[in-house]
């Protein structure tokens, strides 16, 4: 559950600024499911048993979902769900399961007898399924979720009744238990506030938090669910999750309790209130100079073979060129925003990279000096030191009278297993700062991670 809640908190901030970029939800869920099955059962997929509480939940949901009249029978999706429960996702199916799928398609009128006869080989079935339910020629995304979205449309267009039916179906078949990292949907009762009222409450809270005009959300599509997390199941914890979708800066969300209160992180850490979302968006913007980041990435794709490599290992000429290009832009953005807090960009704006002059100790000698520190300063033995053959260099001219060689030493590619056998961290990085004119060791650092909001960490790592 913690995993899902953390993802939702982060996603709500990113969705607000990156609306229009669609995710691949069924593929993500497949990876999570597979990883969880392997971790919990040693690689064996098992049918999970329902607890008494979860069975009671199922009974409540079954009684709350009315009969639905769809152009395509619910039974079709239930048959597919049963096939997935017993045999996994499409890529896991053998010929027997694929023949069963053809029978299901025929039974529910999605193909004719003639078309079924043409699906007489595994290759033919694969081609049909990829064309109907795949994405860009991929079969690994085919499963219940992709089939549902193909036939019923994206989930954000489903009715509350459809979402509740989807939960009911998963529980009844065994695809959803209280152990799943997923949300369950139900229908509100007469004592709960009704959907239209919840939407109005959410809309007012969003408009107030973002300082919107009265008609700002009128053209937005509304997506509403009455839900709670599977592992948190209690009727009292059901709440409305409401999203407004539009063009441009077009995604806003708000959660509303069954009695009409705006939810915030003190009530459920995954339910940020609109005011909290505004605060997080401002913090994110202050800590990430997106203009400078985009220009840096564009430079990398144009000038660095293979795109964005680790900055430590760029050629000296490119380090100088990109930071010289970005410096005036970063300084301008800093001047315009008193809360600017992108520590990496601040470092690039206030520190200067250059090229060694005739007085500088040559690179080869500097690298040898840095490597000696692996045994003398860092205490590595010769076998451990020998694995650190990946070298990056910065030539720092922030103090032109005392330029620095900043040397990065990391594991050579493909030596991770050897390193672990020698009790070394595969993410360990060694840094040695050397006076470029005198050869004096100015500083040494060892770290396995860098806090991007900590100026000391940034200074150590750049």
Image: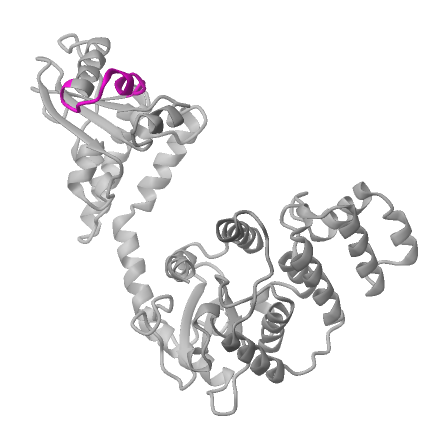
- In the displayed structure image, the side of residue 452 where residue 402 appears, left or right: left
* 218 and 196: which is toward the camera: 196
- For the residue pair 82 and 207, the one nearer the viewer reads as 82
Q: Position of residue 265 (x, y in %)?
A: 31, 69
Q: Quadrant of the N terminus?
A: bottom left
- The verdict on residue 283 being magenta is no
- Is residue 120 something that shows in the picture? yes
| Colouring scheme, one of rainbow, by chain, secondary structure, one colour | one colour
Taking the image as shown, residue 138 lies to the left or right of residue 187, namely right
Vertical arrangement, residue 133 with respect to residue 229, above or below? above
Q: Is residue 303 left or right of residue 30?
A: left
- Image: 352 above or below 242: above
Q: Percent from the top left, x then y, of residue 20?
A: 50, 55
Determine the image quadrant of residue 18.
Answer: bottom left
Percent x, y of residue 89: 65, 52
Q: Which residues are magenta?
A: 376-391
Q: Residue at x 50, y 68 (%)?
A: 178
Residue at screen point 49% across, 61% down: 247
Q: Residue furthest bottom?
A: 191
Pick the residue in front: 255 or 41: 41
Quadrant of the frame with the C terminus: top left
Q: Position of residue 295 (x, y in %)?
A: 36, 37
In the image: residue 326, left or right of residue 12:
left
Q: Is residue 255 above or below residue 330?
A: below
Residue positioned 9% across, 25% down in the render:
399
381 within the magenta span: yes
- Residue 316 in sight from this viewpoint: no
The residue at 88%/53% (across/down) is 116
């Amino acid at each position: 559950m913690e995993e899902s809640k953390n993802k939702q908190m982060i996603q709500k901030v990113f969705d607000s600024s990156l609306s229009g970029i669609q995710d691949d939800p069924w593929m993500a869920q497949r990876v999570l499911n597979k990883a969880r099955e392997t971790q919990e059962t040693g690689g064996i997929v098992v049918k999970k048993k329902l607890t008494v509480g979860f069975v009671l939940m199922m009974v409540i949901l079954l009684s709350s979902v009315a009969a639905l009249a769809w152009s395509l029978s619910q039974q079709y999706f239930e048959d597919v769900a049963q096939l997935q429960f017993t045999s996994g996702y499409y890529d896991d199916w053998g010929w027997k399961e694929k023949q069963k799928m053809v029978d299901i398609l025929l039974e529910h009128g999605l193909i004719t007898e003639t078309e079924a006869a043409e699906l007489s080989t595994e290759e033919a079935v694969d081609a049909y399924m990829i064309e109907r339910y795949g994405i860009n020629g991929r079969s690994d995304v085919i499963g219940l979720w992709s089939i549902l979205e193909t036939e019923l449309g994206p989930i954000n267009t489903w009715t509350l009744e459809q979402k509740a039916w989807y939960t009911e179906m998963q529980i009844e078949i065994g695809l959803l238990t209280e152990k799943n990292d997923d949300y369950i949907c139900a229908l509100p009762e007469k004592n709960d506030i009704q959907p239209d009222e919840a939407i109005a409450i959410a809309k007012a809270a969003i408009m107030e938090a973002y300082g919107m005009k009265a008609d700002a959300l009128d053209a937005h599509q509304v997506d509403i669910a009455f839900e709670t997390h599977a592992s948190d199941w209690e009727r009292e914890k059901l709440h409305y999750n409401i999203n407004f979708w539009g063009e441009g800066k077009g995604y806003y969300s708000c959660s509303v309790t069954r009695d009409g209160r705006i939810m915030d992180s003190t009530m459920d850490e995954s339910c940020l209130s609109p005011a909290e979302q505004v605060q997080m968006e401002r913090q994110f913007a202050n800590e990430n100079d997106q203009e400078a980041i985009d220009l840096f990435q564009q430079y990398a794709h144009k000038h660095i073979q293979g795109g964005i490599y680790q900055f430590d290992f760029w050629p000296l000429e490119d380090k100088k060129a990109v930071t010289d290009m970005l410096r005036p832009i970063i300084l301008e953005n800093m001047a315009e925003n008193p809360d600017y807090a992108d520590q990496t960009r601040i470092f690039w704006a206030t520190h200067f990279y250059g090229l060694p002059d005739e007085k500088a100790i040559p690179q080869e000698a500097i690298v040898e000096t840095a490597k000696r520190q692996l045994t003398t300063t860092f205490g590595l033995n010769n076998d451990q030191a020998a694995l650190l053959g990946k070298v990056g260099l910065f030539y720092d001219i922030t103090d032109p009278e005392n330029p620095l060689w900043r040397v990065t030493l990391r594991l050579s590619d493909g030596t991770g297993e050897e390193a672990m056998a020698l009790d070394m961290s595969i993410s360990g990085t060694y840094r040695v700062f050397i006076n470029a004119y005198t050869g004096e060791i100015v500083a040494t650092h060892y770290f396995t991670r860098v806090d991007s909001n900590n100026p000391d960490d940034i200074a150590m790592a750049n």
